[in-house]
Image (tube, rainbow, N blue to C red):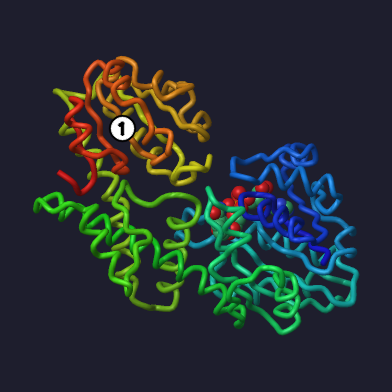
Amino acid sequence: MKVYVVGCGYVGLVTAACLAELGHNVLGTDINREKIKKLQKGKSPIYEAGLEEIIEKNIGSGRLKFQVGIDANINKYDLAMIAVGTPERVSDGRADLYYVAETAKQIAKNARKKDFVVVGKSTVPIGTSGQIRQSLSLYNDSRTKFHVGSNPETLREGSAVSDFMNPDRIIIGGDQKAQKALLKLYEKINCPKIVTNAESAEMIKLASNFMLALRVSATNILARMCEATGANAEEVMKGVGMDKRIGPQYLRAGVGYGGSCFPKDTKSIRSIAKHWGLDTSLFDAVMKINADQREWFCQKIDKMTLFTLKNKKIAVWGLAFKPDTDDIREAPSIEIIKWLLGEGAKVFAYDPAANVRKIFGNKIHHCRDKYEAVKKAELLVVLTEWKEFQEADIKKVKKLMLVPKIADGRNIFDPKKIRKIGFEYSSIGRK
Ligand code: NAD
């Protein structure tokens, strides 16, 4: 099929590249000129395993192209996919649909075909497909008949390409023509496909992310309890996850969830419940526990500190909200570094892929490697569970530090081993 993907961010770009890899002819478009320039040269603007290779390969085969903006070229395509951002609206936590609205308008203005399938891939509030349909008709003056679908994306950053190619399920919503087109689009992917109306498709995505955020917050509140009572959160959650009704995923204690999805989608589903006059207490609790978890971890750092953090050199390992990505949106590292700076600490941070220069500028030191960060540090704070950190030469770290102390927000080290080497060590939910 010929697919027109609007928005070349983490989702749109992976979608465009993977659809081309599956044999479709794909055009990826974005309003960001710099991004498109890079992509036209076969370079990925984001860090994602395996992505650049398939971009290069499919540009080479002629199945993948990129251009700036939407134009009449769109009429050569069978299906348009909206994969633009839906950030949080600062005022009330609802999703900001401005980019979706602009995209629908631009598609409508350029469409001249008799029939056209337009599919929403972004995560949106329930009912957005209906609004896309209205907008497409309103701004189109060629009597195009639009068929609107909803196909929310479920990939995870860090394993986006393999998630796209081997998903647990594909969510297919919308009217019949849109559903049919989506089934054809994904016919080569062998997985369960849930076919439903657009509203249910939109809700499946928000509900799934909420359930995952709920598991993270439940795990974190239990981890705090473990620590208080002498239980070991890691062993407890291993035991809990062995129950087949529960399963082992998303039961790791840490400094809370972050990223571009869970925080925003949890706020979004809460605001939808509020709009309908429904009980929001469970959504509120999940968000509160997540915010408290960071504060609770900062208190741990405070307790480990001799006198005060003022003027102390503190090393931070990990900035990305999770390993194998350069995404720092809503990453716990940002709030924790802000708190450290507020306390007067000198922060020396390192991450293998992410950087926070745009947020902190020269207020912190951006280190080129993990060992540079810990040199003469009085505490090492671990905020992302990169493999590189788990495999660090920890004896070398001890020698480099002024005071061997670690506050491990991701439980990457074995407490017994690390203490035996001579570190003062604190982690999450484990004594
Ligand atoms: P992103 O911010 O990385 O990318 C969005 C892109 O859309 C940007 O490159 C932006 O320039 C472009 N854009 C905005 N307006 C445009 C327009 N009018 N025309 C063309 N391009 C335009 O966002 P993302 O992380 O890719 O997320 C996109 C959507 O997918 C969001 O709704 C998000 O919630 C959802 N989602 C994200 C993930 C994830 O892991 N990032 C996973 C599943 C779903």
What residue is at 9 percent from the left and 53 percent from the top? Answer: 229
Q: Position of residue 396 (x, y in %)?
A: 32, 19
Q: Position of residue 60 (x, y in %)?
A: 83, 45
Q: Is residue 363 above or below residue 160?
A: above
Hey, what amino acid is under mark 1? Val
Q: Is residue 168 above or below residue 380?
A: below
What residue is at 25 percent from the left and 65 percent from the top? Answer: 240
* Closer-to-camera residue (346/415): 415
Toward the bottom, the furthest residue is 176
* Closer-to-camera residue (406/295): 406
Q: Which residue is mark 1?
A: 381
* Closer-to-camera residue (277/215): 215
Q: In the rendered view of the protein, which quadrant contains the N terminus?
A: bottom right
Q: Position of residue 328 (x, y in %)?
A: 49, 41
Q: Is residue 72 left or right of residue 358?
A: right
Q: Position of residue 201 (x, y in %)?
A: 57, 75
Q: Is residue 162 left or right of residue 285?
A: right
Q: Quarter-wise, where is residue 401 in the image?
A: top left
Residue 163 visible in the displayed image? yes
Toward the left, the furthest residue is 229
